[in-house]
Image (spheres, rainbow, N blue to C red):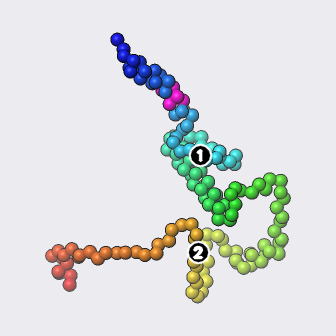
Amino acid sequence: MFNTRTILTYFILVLLVPFSITEKHNRPNSIQKRRSPEPDEPRHTSGCHSCRMREEIKQRNLMVIKDEILRRIGFEEAPNITGKALPQVPSEYLMRIEEENGGMQSDQPQFRSGYTVVEEEDDYHVRTQQIIAYAQPCKFNSYFYHIY
């Protein structure tokens, strides 16, 4: 009634279907994390798939930014500063900074008279070196002749 090929196919399906179902339940989406989230990071509580994806993308972007900062300062991982007491900034330095900035908030633009050039060194991202624009023929219509 059944040939060996059909029986073998059913046997493989019976073995693989439970594995694929449990794999889907263990992973909420297809994005895999490189490391577990830090304890101070907020966990998503919403059951909405879009919200979970957005939160996952946000956490991944933060992780990429942190890794990029560590790479640029020459660290492979964040230093462990647990239990170290950080020194207090002397009040004279804080007063000097306050006087130099004049109480300016961080979101206000800093206007200075004169010509200033700000150029950042970027050793990782791509810089545009050449732009090529090709000329295109002008499209003439009856309105164009009346203007000139």
4 with respect to 43 (left or right): left
Q: Position of residue 69 (x, y in %)?
A: 64, 62
Question: Looking at the image, which is closer to me, 62 or 19?
Answer: 19
Q: Position of residue 2 (x, y in %)?
A: 36, 14
Query: Is 20 within the magenta?
Result: yes
Residue at the image point whose x is 74% and y is 75% from the top:
98
For residue 120, the mark is: 2
Which residues fall within the magenta stretch?
17-22
Question: Residue 134, located in which quarter of the rendered image?
Answer: bottom left
Identify the amino acid type marked 2: Glu
Kindly report the secondary structure that dominates the magenta region of the rendered protein.
helix
Q: Position of residue 54 (x, y in %)?
A: 53, 48
Identify the amino acid type marked 1: Lys
Q: Position of residue 88 (x, y in %)?
A: 83, 65
Q: Earlier in the sequence, mark 2 or mark 1?
A: 1
CA distance separating discs 2 and 1: 32 Å
Q: Is residue 141 above or below residue 42?
A: below
Question: Looking at the image, which is closer to me, 74 or 91?
Answer: 74
Q: Is residue 126 above or below residue 9?
A: below
